[in-house]
Amino acid sequence: MITEKNESLASRSLVPGTPLLELRQIGKRFSRTLDLPARIARKLGAEISTETVHAVDKVSLSIGRGEVVGLVGESGCGKSTLGRLALGVYPPSEGQRFWHGNEANGQAVSSIDHLPAAARRAIQLKMQMVFQDPYASLNPRMRVGKAISEAPLAHGLIQPQERDAWLAQLLQKVGLDPSLAERYPHQFSGGQRARIGIARALAVQPEFIVCDEAVAALDVSIQAQIINLFMQLRADLGLTYLFISHDLAVVRHISDRVFIMYLGRIVETANTDEIFEHPHHPYTKALIAELPKIAGGKRSYQPIQGEIPSPLHPPSGCHFHPRCPHAMPECKRAQPTFRQVAPGHWSACILDQPDVGQVAILHGTKAGL
């Protein structure tokens, strides 16, 4: 099994000093209770049970101050849920969150969710989110200036008489004309709405921002502008990002460190150059192998075989084994241990075990790894 100690070491292996945010064995399950007809049917003998989605399965992850951590995986693997768990939008089913940024002595605080309400609110204010679809997250009947300034006014970060000058400065910081503050969301382009979403996140002076597919809906040229804006704000304001995306090219450009996620679990982590140049887990290899390349000429596209299993009934052992070309009987029985395969590079695969790996090489199972 993946031990809490090993996964915690993996999550902190490249973070100098005390992490800004740390998740320890965090998990989230969504259960749908049975309605009245279903309960009656079950009492009459029908085989009906409560459905439980295992969205995030005991993930440990830490993020250093000023770091950009990329979180990569297929749709439905739990990336967005993990981002919301990090922010406290969803209460965890298990595990704990730790915030280390505001302690003068540099010592770890208690779990965020166990702090007094006032202290918890102060920390939550330091964590914000930029959504994939800014139009859906904006009130279509509220002018954008009011949408951006609403939270800082409510929390007393600015005074009403300061609002106009403060708003103009913030809009300029994200590349928008202050004269547009009285417009409604539908009067902006997709790129402008993305900037509005960023401005709203910055309005409460956060230290940590979760970017949930923040550039996925934009044209490539606009994506580049928004990514450059993220990096400029990081340099100017000392921001820390958890950048969630399925676009490996974007993650490679913006991230210092990458976590690869599959069906609710982290399967590999390393710094960006290491994981793209020397991927180790079969799932990571399959993802990176299909990145477009200028060199190499014509080649055939070979997607990962099969479909991602349902989180309602995840496979036993290694979740990737039904789709893995190197799967062995042991993969179905036991969850692989997180092991360090290179300095700061951790992978959760049975082939990482020295004894198993040598046997696999002898039998050709590890060919191509």
Image (spheres, helix red, strand yellow):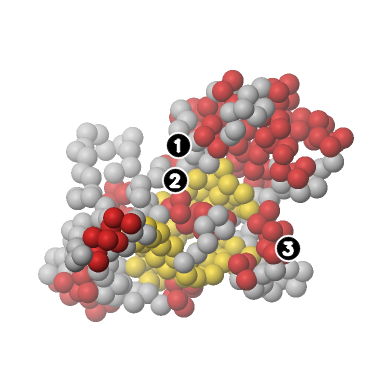
Q: Amino acid at mark 3?
A: Ala
The answer, for residue 259, to whether it is visible in the render is yes
Quarter of the image where one finds residue 147: top right
User: Residue 4 at x, y = what percent?
Assistant: 45, 76
Q: Residue at x 38, y 71 (%)?
A: 338
Circle 2 Cα neighbour tier, 10 Å, few/some/many (<14 / 14–19 / ≥20): many
Circle 1 Cα neighbour tier, 10 Å, few/some/many (<14 / 14–19 / ≥20): some
Q: Disc 2, disc 3: CB below 8 Å?
A: no
Q: Residue at x 25, y 66 (%)?
A: 43
User: In which quadrant of the rendered image does the N terminus lie?
Assistant: bottom left
Q: Residue at x 55, y 49 (%)?
A: 210
Quarter of the image where one finds residue 100: bottom right
Q: Nearer the viewer, residue 36 or 1?
A: 36
Q: Is residue 146 left or right of residue 54?
A: right
Residue receiving disc 2: 245
| N-term-proximal mark, 1 vs 2 | 1
Q: Of the numbered discs in the image, which one, if any, rests on residue 66?
A: none
| N-term-proximal mark, 2 vs 3 | 3
User: Residue 61 at x, y = what percent?
Assistant: 50, 64
The answer, for residue 321, to whether it is visible in the render is no
Q: Is residue 188 left or right of residue 78?
A: right
Q: Residue at x 20, y 60 (%)?
A: 322
Q: Amino acid at mark 1?
A: Ala
Question: Which type of secondary structure does the marked residue at label 3 adopt?
Answer: helix
| N-term-proximal mark, 1 vs 3 | 3
Q: Disc 1, disc 2: CB below 8 Å?
A: yes
The residues tagged by marks 1 and 3 sit, at their Cα atoms, a distance apart of 35 Å
Q: Of the numbered discs in the image, which one, if any, rests on residue 118?
A: 3
Q: Residue furthest right?
A: 161
Residue receiving disc 1: 216
